[in-house]
Amino acid sequence: MLLNQDVRDTSAAEKYLEVANGARGRGDRAGAIEALEAAYAADPDNARTCFELAYELDLVGEEDEAIHLYEQAIQTPTPALNALLNLAVLYEDREDYERAERCVKQVLATDPNHARAKLFIKDISASMNMQVDE
């Protein structure tokens, strides 16, 4: 079956997600990425697929694509907190502190006691106010 932008094959996407989980279990990162890319092709609007593929791509250094996918994954009414935090880390690495701060503040708005987010917001604030002495 040929897919176009208006057709989503959620059943196929779920099957590819299962294949990806199996590959991860065997330590086969390349196989997991391949399966996640197939899941994404089958259902590119699935936030879970976007998150999982972004995570795997980030681990192999594909930061540009990971950012794109994390940004897509958080376009839901209740985005995954880990997607927001992982995206914030990538933004901070690129010295895009404003975007990083927005992501972390969104986590804290949902969960004000989120320990990792509370520490990370302090780190971002320090980075924003940091002065480099040449």
Image (cartoon, rainbow, N blue to C red):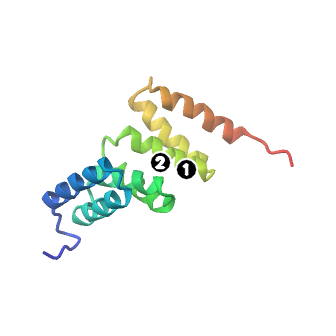
- At label 2, counting other C-alpha atoms closer than 10 Å, the crowd grade (few under 14, some 14-19, many 20 or more) is many
- Which element is circle 2 on? helix
Q: Which residue is the extreme one toward the bottom?
A: 2
Q: Position of residue 81 (x, y in %)?
A: 39, 38
Residue, disc 1? 91
| Residue shown at the point (51%, 58%) measured from the top left | 61
Residue, disc 2? 87
Q: Is residue 121 left or right of residue 32?
A: right
Three-letter amino acid code at disc 2? Leu
Relative to 111, say whether 128 is above or below: below
Relative to 33, say whether 116 is above or below: above
Q: Position of residue 117 (x, y in %)?
A: 49, 32
Three-letter amino acid code at disc 1? Tyr
Relative to 39, say whether 99 is above or below: above
Q: Is residue 93 left or right of residue 108?
A: right
- Which is more toward the observer, 98 or 86? 86
| Residue shown at the point (60%, 49%) measured from the top left | 93
Q: Position of residue 76 (x, y in %)?
A: 31, 47
Q: Which residue is the extreme one toward the right?
A: 134
Q: Which residue is the extreme one toward the front?
A: 26
Q: Position of residue 21 (x, y in %)?
A: 27, 50
Residue contact at pointers 2 and 1, CB within 8 angstroms? yes
Q: Is residue 30 left or right of residue 40?
A: right
